[in-house]
Each structure stands twice: as C-alpha cells, then as structure tokens.
C-alpha cells in the first residue's frame, strides 16, 4: 500500500513533467505553424504588426548567460577551492552559510537592487571607464543614460550563478581523497600545485556539471533580468544598450499580450527555453554519471 | 605536472647538499597568488551579500512601522504578507507529502534500475525555469477558467518545492542506519510499518529542514505569481484561494516597474520583510539539520 503511494508519487512527478512539455509545445503551435523554424533566425519582434522573430532574444539570452558563466564560474570555483581546501574550519563554517544565503536572496529583490543601486553605479562609473579603455571592441559601445543594460543583467545573473556553482564545487573538492593530495604534497608540490595537479583534474567532470547547472539557472531566470535589462528585442553587440532574453520577455509581455499570435510566440520562446534547459540539465547529469559521482576521483 | 618533469631533467648530484632549486621561489609566489585569488573571490561573494542586504535594510527600515505592516493598500502591506503566507502554505501542504513519498520510493523501494530515471525526473524538474511552470499552469488553469487564482500559483510553487523536499528528505533517509532497517526486518515487521514507525521518525528532522528550505525558496518566487496571480489590488485580505490573492513578490515587481519614489520605499520595506523571513527560515533549517544529523550520528 505504502509502496503503491510512493510509486504513484514518483510517477506523478514524471506525468507533470510530460504535461508541462505537452502544454508548452501546444501553446506554441500557432506560432510554429506560422513561422516554422525561421522564427529562430528571424530578427524583428513587433507585436502590433504581428511580426515575431526570436533571434534578438536568443542572442540576448546567450550573451547574458555567457557573461554570467565567464565571470561567475572562475570566481565560484575559487570560492569552492577556498572553502574546501584553504580555509580553516572555523572560517569555513562562517563563510559557507553566507554564500548559501546569497543563493537564497529572491530574484525579485536582487533585480530591484540591480535596478536602483547597481544600474546607476554601472552607468556613472564602470561603463564609461570600459568604453573609454576598450571602446574599440564593439562589445563596449557607448553607455546609455538609463541604468538598464545587458551588462547589468549579466552581472545580476553572475551573482545568482556564483553561489550555486560554489556550493557544488565545494562539496566536490571536499570529496577528493586526502591521500592523493598528501601524496602530491610529499613530492614537494606547493599548495597551488596540489590543487592544479590533483584536485582540479580529478573533479573536472563535476565542475563541468556544476557549470551546466549554473547555466540552466541563468538561461531561465526571468524576473531579475526583466527588471534590469530594459526590455529591448533587437540583437546588437553593445553590452551597454538595453536588450531582452527569452525568459525576461515572457515575464514582461505575457501579462499584456496583444494577440493570440503574440501569446503563441511567447510560448514558442518558452518551448525553446525548455528544450535548451532540459538539454543542459540532462548533459549535466550525464557528465556526472559518465565520469563518476565524485568527479571521477576514484577512477 | 610539467614542474616535476623539469626538475628531473636537471643534473642530480647526490654529493651536493639539498638546496632549493632555482624556481622554488617562483613556485611559492605562484602558489601564494593563487591562494590570494581564492580568498579574494570568497570575500567578494560575502561583500556582494553584505552590500545587497545593507541596501535593503537601510532603505527598507525607513518604510517599516506598525501601520505599514498591518494596513492594506495604499498605505500598508498587510494583505500582501498574509496572501504570500496563504499561497506558500497551500503549496507546501501539497508538495510535502509528494516530496516525502518520492524520497521514500527512491531510498526504500526503488532498486538501481528505477532510482535512476526517477532521480533524473527530479533533477530536470529542479532545473526547470519557474516561468515555464507558470506558462504551463496558465494554459491548464487560468486560461481554462478565465480567472487568475492563488490556487494556480500555489500549484506552481508546489511543483518547484517537490524536488527540493524530495532531495533533502532523501539525503537524511540515507543517514538512517541500515542496522535499524535490518533489525525491523529480522523481527518480522512489515516494510511499510517499519518505514512509518522507525525510518520516518528518525528522519523527521531532515524532512522539516528540507521543507523549511523549500518554503524559503517558494516565498520569493515571482514568475509564477506574475502570470497566475497578479491582479489583486491588495486593499483587503483575500482568503478564497480561487480568487487572485495579493502577494509580496508581485507587489515588489510592480513597484519596481513604476518610476515612483514612494513606491520604491514601499518596495524596499517589502523586500526587507521578505528577506528577513527567508534568511530566518534558512538559518532555522540549518540549525535543525545540524541537530538532527547529530542525533542520527549518535
């Protein structure tokens, strides 16, 4: 009897997952029938004209997530190294919960802070500096007057991704067998050489999985991004202009969609997001399984 | 590893006293720099947390007073707080049994063959963007009934909470000593009875912890609220879950979209209360987890 209940609960989770995919793809059906796959490459997003193309939004999603991972992953892995291998236990017991607290800050509050505090700061100091120094790279175009930009969205996502990757990599590094590290140290390695030569190679797959986990989070974050990115839909290279991501445009435009096709196009975006998100998740767990649970430490 | 190779290539003269090779200073310097980078990274994360919380506290404290907390729109936020509590409570009531049952299935019943796909389903569910869950329930409930409702939002939150509760419960179930299960088996106790009377009570601390953590996560979840439950005005407490229920995250979101300084103050105040509740839940659950782990380890 209890077994039946448990099995039913597990089955229910599976059914919900399948239903989610089914409903989202069904919702996207009108847009898919009209645009087909050219939706992905088409640029213009103009709800009043019934013209919908996702390229700008897909591009915005990729650039913000890439920024979050490029900045966030090295920082987060450094934090993991510090917490697992360098910090004394008393320090670790203070910093670990603080890092986890950062993950607990709701996205709407982080976005609100990004809008009122981070955005203006970036516009007044960081963006002019980057533009003046690296202005020849198209990424660092002229700063806009409002605080909303792809750049601040990327930074907010970085803040959200760091604690996720940091806590996973911390657990990975703590699982690396002590004997391996001691062996390397006995051969005369410095602390960094132990980390570089033993800890990082044995946990490579685990770190990859952690980054994919963070990537999934960054791709799907809707609220905080929609608060700070400004709601544009065109694709351009400048980080300092407004932009949009797939998830953020759903949050911004869904409640006030102007037509059935508009709604369907938003579902199309959600379908794309679902495919990418599930793929990165499956890839993460495949990498984890294929190369061993503790990052292949005992391979 | 190239460092070791380079050392071997040098001529080794056993009659010479052991001295540091030429690049030892450089290697130590590199090591110190790397350790420094790790420390700075950790400090940076803590600094960001402090900066965000300081902004919320310093702006939010100005907004908070007794009328602000107890009265409704437009002077206060009482109905939003009550509404969020209602929705999260309904969601947790749905999610907790399902999450615990799934965890039991994984740790007590499923062999390797069944545990893997179920675990995979949980992982995918956990990684699902909340906005997609919201869109799913929009078609299923809001579009079908032509009525936004707190209940629809509660189901969305439940879908978010289930994998969290299941994962946390499973971790603590794995800590329950196998000897207890075997002892019960040896006495001829039926499986379901040993689970209900021995294993679940031993794991109860962990289950409460996981539930509290998932509540903390659900309370701040905005995307499902925005799509499923965002039209309530917030001038009165709404107890019917089949209507729109005013709630904190949507209010913060709406205020942040309007360029109105007074609204910003109210949003800071709401943020402060929400963040205080969430951090208190997080700390409380951590305390409980440590206690129950100690109990199990004994």
Image (cartoon, helix red, strand yellow):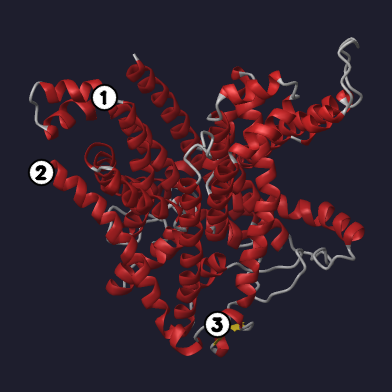
- Between residue A128 and residue A275, name the one nearer to us: A275
Nearest to N terminus: mark 2 or mark 3: 2
The residue mark sitting in front, 1 or 2, is 1
Q: Are marks 2 and 3 in contact (CB under 8 Å)?
A: no
Q: Position of residue B184 (x, y in %)?
A: 14, 23
**In the rendered image, which quarter is residue B164 located in?**
top left
- Asked if residue B2 is positioned above or below residue A279 in the image, the reply reads above
How far separated are the C-alphas under marks 1 and 3? 55 Å
Residue under pointer 1: B178
Residue under pointer 3: A39
Chain of the residue where label 2 is placed in the rendered structure? A
**In screen coordinates, is A287 left or right of B85?**
right
How far separated are the C-alphas under marks 2 and 3? 50 Å
What numbered label is drawn on residue A33?
none
Chain of the residue where label 1 is placed in the rendered structure? B
Q: Position of residue A124 (x, y in %)?
A: 82, 54
The residue mark sitting in front, 1 or 3, is 1
The residue shown at (46%, 84%) is: A31
Query: Element type at marker 1?
Result: helix
- Asked if residue A170 is positioned above or below residue B241 in the image, the reply reads above
- Between residue B18 and residue B193, name the one nearer to us: B18
Q: How many marks?
A: 3
């Amino acid at each position: 009897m209890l077994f039946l209940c448990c099995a039913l609960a597990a089955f229910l989770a599976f059914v919900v997952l399948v239903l989610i995919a089914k409903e989202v793809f069904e919702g996207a059906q009108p847009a898919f029938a009209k645009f087909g796959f050219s939706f992905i490459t088409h640029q213009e997003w103009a709800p009043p004209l019934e013209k919908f193309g996702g390229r700008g939004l897909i591009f915005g999603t990729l650039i913000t997530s890439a920024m979050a991972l490029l900045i966030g992953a090295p920082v987060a892995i450094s934090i993991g190294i510090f917490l697992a291998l360098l910090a004394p236990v008393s320090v670790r017991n203070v910093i670990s919960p603080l890092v986890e607290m950062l993950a607990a800050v709701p996205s709407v509050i982080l976005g609100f802070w990004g809008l009122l505090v981070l955005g203006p700061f970036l516009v007044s100091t960081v963006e002019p500096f980057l533009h003046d120094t690296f202005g020849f790279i198209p990424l660092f175009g002229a700063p806009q007057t409002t605080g909303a930009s792809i750049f601040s969205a990327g930074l907010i996502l970085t803040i959200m991704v760091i604690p996720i990757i940091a806590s996973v990599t911390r657990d990975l590094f703590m699982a690396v067998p002590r004997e391996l590290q001691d062996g390397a140290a006995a051969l005369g390695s410095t602390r960094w050489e132990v980390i570089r030569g033993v800890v990082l190679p044995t946990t490579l797959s685990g770190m990859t999985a952690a980054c994919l986990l963070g990537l999934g989070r960054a791709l799907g974050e809707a609220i905080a991004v929609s608060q700070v990115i400004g709601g544009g839909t065109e694709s351009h290279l400048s980080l300092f202009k407004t932009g949009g991501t797939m998830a953020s445009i759903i949050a911004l435009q869904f409640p006030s969609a102007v037509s059935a096709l508009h709604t369907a196009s938003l579902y199309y975006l959600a379908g794309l997001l679902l495919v990418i998100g599930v793929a990165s998740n499956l890839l993460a767990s495949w990498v984890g399984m294929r190369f061993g649970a503790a990052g292949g430490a005992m391979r | 590893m190239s460092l070791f190779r380079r050392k071997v290539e040098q001529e080794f003269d056993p009659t010479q006293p052991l001295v540091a090779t030429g690049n030892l200073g450089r290697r130590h310097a590199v090591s110190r720099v790397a350790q420094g980078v790790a420390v700075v990274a950790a400090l940076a994360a803590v600094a960001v947390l402090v900066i965000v919380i300081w902004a919320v506290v310093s702006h939010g404290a100005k907004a908070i007073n007794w009328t602000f907390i107890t009265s409704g729109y437009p002077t206060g936020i009482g109905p939003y707080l009550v509404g969020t509590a209602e929705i999260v409570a309904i969601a947790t009531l749905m999610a907790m049994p399902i999450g615990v049952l799934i965890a039991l299935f994984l740790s007590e019943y499923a062999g390797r063959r069944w545990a893997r796909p179920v675990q995979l389903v949980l992982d995918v569910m956990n990684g699902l963007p909340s906005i997609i869950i919201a869109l799913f329930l929009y078609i299923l409930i809001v579009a079908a009934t032509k009525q936004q409702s707190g209940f629809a939002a509660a189901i969305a939150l439940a879908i978010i909470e289930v994998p969290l509760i299941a994962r946390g419960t499973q971790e603590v179930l794995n800590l329950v000593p196998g000897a207890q299960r075997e002892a019960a088996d040896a006495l001829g106790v039926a499986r379901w009875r040993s689970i209900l009377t021995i294993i679940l009570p031993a794991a109860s601390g962990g289950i409460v912890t996981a539930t509290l953590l998932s509540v903390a996560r659900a309370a701040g979840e905005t995307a499902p609220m925005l799509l499923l439950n965002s039209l309530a005005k917030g001038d009165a407490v709404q107890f019917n879950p089949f209507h729109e229920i005013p709630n904190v995250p949507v209010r913060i979101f709406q205020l942040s979209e309007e360029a109105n300084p007074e609204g910003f103050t109210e949003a800071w105040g709401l943020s402060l209360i929400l963040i205080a509740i969430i951090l208190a839940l997080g700390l409380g659950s951590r305390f409980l987890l440590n206690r129950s782990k100690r109990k199990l380890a004994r």
